[in-house]
Image: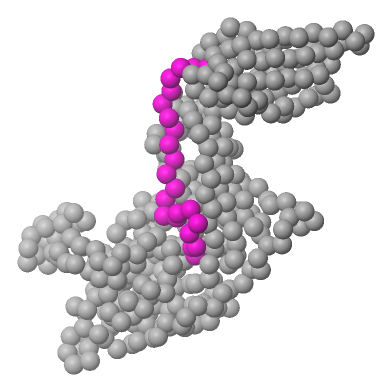
């Protein structure tokens, strides 16, 4: 018999394959134990009882002992024992899941955004995502896209079906991430997909429409509100955005955003430093749907009504009543389609997922078991939610 890694080997990589091979004999049993651990590694591949292989990821600074028994055609039994030691130190690969928490219910457009603590060399990126399974129930096609060397996103080909359960299983223990970084553990998170919502903002007609459903053609229109969007030079980003989070108040400052004299000088034409309320973030780059009571002037807003002109610095301004209603109704992961803008959203705004062609995504994830063995999935429906009260008047 031959055993790999060789007996006495040190500095063995955490992604090393353990292999036992027999010549003119069959392998009867193999036990691989990490010293100090009573568990044995799983026999992965017998190959006609002549070879045994394990490639599931090893632990850092650990000694493994392989005990293998082979039997010849004449019945002679051979026992071989071999031990090796893995690398003693490594930088730990860490993963942050952005915007969605374990057990959370999200909207139909929610991508899975993973951020690593170190750039992953391009050559190592396929191996990393090969060890991250995304399972949707009911199954839906999805794929991965690297927006940069630290950030990889997964999304379905089209919106998730309402009622779907999505599980992310990262089997990263022993995965070489390059530059001395290794996966040293595994993790798993799940989320559910809630009611289908769609918001459509038209910067030309200055309206914001909200629907129960994921399509304006088939969904139920439950609110149509006047809105102010970005003025010339401060356009609202266009494309399919995603609700990322809610904040009851955000201190919005012009100077850090625009860094111009007009924006940084108190009293300047573009200066502001305001506490802004009922903020629904639709970008990681500072674009919000929020209350803008300063828009309204005159009795019942007759002088400067909402929707009369685009006057914001890129945010989508609503009356306080409508902003509050939307804040309470929308959910993280809801799609927000902005049409009519000359400024296209991009990854720099945190909104590359639905602007990137599906053909650029690398297929990934895996289907749930076939219907003959899998438990019955929850029905996929557009769950009805409370109807927002449309309010076209100012606050």
**What residue occupies the far right of the structure in this picture?**
74
Is residue 223 on the magenta stretch? no
Residue 304: % across, % down: 21, 85
Q: How many marks?
A: 0
Q: Camera-side residue: 24 or 197? A: 24
The answer to whether residue 133 of the structure is visible from this angle is yes
Residue drawn 54% across the image and 60% down it: 192
Q: Residue at x 30, y 64 (%)?
A: 247
Q: Is residue 298 above or below residue 2?
A: below
Q: Residue at x 41, y 26 (%)?
A: 91
Which of the image's four quarters has the N terminus? Answer: top right
Residue 63 picture location, percent across and down: 55, 16
Q: Which residues are magenta?
A: 86-107
Q: Position of residue 363 (x, y in %)?
A: 61, 47
Q: Nearer the viewer, residue 336 or 386?
A: 386
Q: Tell me the quarter of the image containing the C terminus.
A: bottom left
Depicted 124 relative to depicted 229: above or below: above
Residue 178 as seen in the image, left or right of residue 370: left
Q: Quadrant of residue 343?
A: bottom left
Q: Is residue 202 visible?
A: no
Side of 208 where 263 appears, left or right? left
Note whether 96 is above or below 8 in the view shown. Answer: below
Please tell me whether residue 60 is drawn above or below residue 4 in the rendered image.
Answer: below
215 sits to left or right of 71: left
Residue drawn at 78 percent across, 25 percent down: 46
Q: Position of residue 248 (x, y in %)?
A: 28, 67
Question: For residue 106: magenta?
Answer: yes
The majority secondary structure of the magenta stretch comes to loop
């Amino acid at each position: 018999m031959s055993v790999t890694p060789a007996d006495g080997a040190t500095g063995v990589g955490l992604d090393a394959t353990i292999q036992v091979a027999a010549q003119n004999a069959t392998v009867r049993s193999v036990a691989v134990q990490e010293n100090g651990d009573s568990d044995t590694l799983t026999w992965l591949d017998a190959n006609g009882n002549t070879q045994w292989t394990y490639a599931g990821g090893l632990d850092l600074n650990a000694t493994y002992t392989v005990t293998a028994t082979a039997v010849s055609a004449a019945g002679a039994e051979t026992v071989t024992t071999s031990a090796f030691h893995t690398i003693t130190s490594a930088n730990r690969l860490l993963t942050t899941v952005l915007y969605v928490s374990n057990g959370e219910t999200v909207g139909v457009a929610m991508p899975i955004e993973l951020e690593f603590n170190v750039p992953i060399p391009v050559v190592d990126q396929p191996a990393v995502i090969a060890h991250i399974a995304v399972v949707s129930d009911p199954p839906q096609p999805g794929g991965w896209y690297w927006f940069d060397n630290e950030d990889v996103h997964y999304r379905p080909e089209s919106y998730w079906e309402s009622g779907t359960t999505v599980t992310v299983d990262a089997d990263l223990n022993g995965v070489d991430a390059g530059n001395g970084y290794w996966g040293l553990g595994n993790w798993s998170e799940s989320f559910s997909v809630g009611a289908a919502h769609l918001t459509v903002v038209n910067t030309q007609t200055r309206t914001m429409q909200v629907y129960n459903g994921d399509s304006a053609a088939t969904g139920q229109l439950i609110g149509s509100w006047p809105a102010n969007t970005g003025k010339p030079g401060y356009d609202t980003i266009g494309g399919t955005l995603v609700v990322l989070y809610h904040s009851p108040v955000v201190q919005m400052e012009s100077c850090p955003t625009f860094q111009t004299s007009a924006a940084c000088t108190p009293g300047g034409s573009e200066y502001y430093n305001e506490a802004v309320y009922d903020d629904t973030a639709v970008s990681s780059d500072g674009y919000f749907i929020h209350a803008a009571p300063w828009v309204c002037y005159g009795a019942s807003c007759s002088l400067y009504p909402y929707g009369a002109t685009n006057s914001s610095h890129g945010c989508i301004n609503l009356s306080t009543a409508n902003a509050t209603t939307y804040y309470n109704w929308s959910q993280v992961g809801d799609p927000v389609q902005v049409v009519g803008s000359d400024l296209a959203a991009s990854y720099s705004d945190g909104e590359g997922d639905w602007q990137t062609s599906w053909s650029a995504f690398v297929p990934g994830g895996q289907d749930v078991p076939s219907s003959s063995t899998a438990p019955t999935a929850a029905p996929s429906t557009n769950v009805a939610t409370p109807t927002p009260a449309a309010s076209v008047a100012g606050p």
